[in-house]
Image: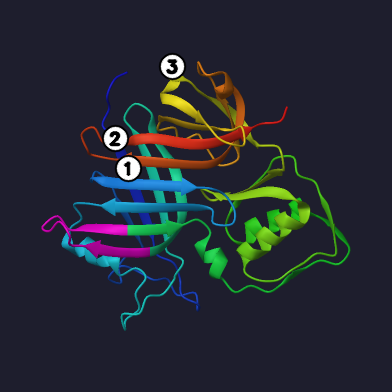
Amino acid sequence: MSFTRKKINLTFKLGRDTNGVQYSFDGKYDTVTVSGLRIQVTIANAGAPSMGQASLIIHGLTPSLLNQLSSMNRLEGGQVSTRFNQLLIEAGDEATGMSLIFQGQVAVAMPTYNNAPDVALQVTAYAGLFEALKVAPALSVRGSVDAAVIMQNLATQNGYMFENNGVSVILSTPYFPGSPKRQMEACANAANINWSLDNGTLAIWPKGGSRGGVVQTISPETGMIGYPAGTPAGGVLVRTLFNPHLHYGAAVQVESSLPFANGKFVLFDIAHDLESETPNGQWETSFSGSVLAL
């Protein structure tokens, strides 16, 4: 296996205030792209209700950019405020290209001076954070309606793509108050289905099933690290070289020399641990999978 230079690209995009006015960096632009720097990223997704979380340490920012990014969630008086400030994370190399592996809202962005003069920026972001805090009118429908239609409408209203993997459950006169994310969760619970906010997509699929798409094969030949471990519930814990095509709720084909770690599993906990511009840095994906019913 050849070694390639690992890359992580970050895009920070400021949101708007409650009056629809666009925030900006220094009154000039609303988007900043960071690339070519030493960045440590951990992305974890264990599904609803928390969804995905990204934790980053960014080295090598200019003092000006460090100050701008660390002030994203601060008002003029210094108070911290949650805004619709988006973070997109892409990872890859020259051989495989770049893939989007996280899209969410910035909750924390602050400098750390522990290793000065190497001042780094620590960032924490969550998928669906803004939708969890946003004020929205209660969702109410008279009569019968397909849960998939409700979820598709919620996705469209909140700027998400929609992915339906075979869900068609009729609800009778549903009433879902709360934030958009709370409404998504309530609808999924009422329909007894799985759901996920993942990389800008609201996905739904039946309980006991999985999301569609190409089934990735994880084996020693495709990058499996070490041996899989078992879980008390009969599932598997697997480490592999970074694979951006593994998603929460997706099916995966595991092949190994261990009898319990062969077959199709559905991912219910997945993490990417990545380091760019770092010799021998981490570049792997780990996941837990439960046996997929045939």
Instruction: Please give the name of the residue rendered at 38% of the width and 58% of the height, measured from the top-left corner.
Output: 124
Residue 266 picture quarter:
top right
Measured from the top left, where is residue 287 in percent x and y? 49, 37
Amino acid type of the residue tagged 2 in the rendering: Lys
Location of the C terminus (image quadrant): top right
Location of the N terminus (image quadrant): top left
Callout 3 secondary element: helix
Measured from the top left, where is residue 286 in percent x and y? 45, 36
Amino acid type of the residue tagged 1 in the rendering: Ile
Q: Which mark is residue 6?
A: 2
Instruction: Tell me, yes or no, whether the highlighted magenta stretch contains residue 111.
Output: yes
Measured from the top left, where is residue 162 in percent x and y? 64, 49
As drawn, which residue projects farthest toward the right?
Answer: 143
In depth, the one of 156 and 224 nearer the eye is 224
Task: Determine crowd level at label 1: few under 14, some 14-19, many 20+ residues with C-alpha closer than 10 A.
Answer: many
Instruction: Please give the name of the residue rendered at 50% of the width and 15% of the height, measured from the top-left corner.
Output: 257
Q: Which mark is residue 8?
A: 1
The first of marks 3 and 1 along the sequence is: 1
The alpha-carbon separation of the residues under discs 2 and 1 comes to 7 Å
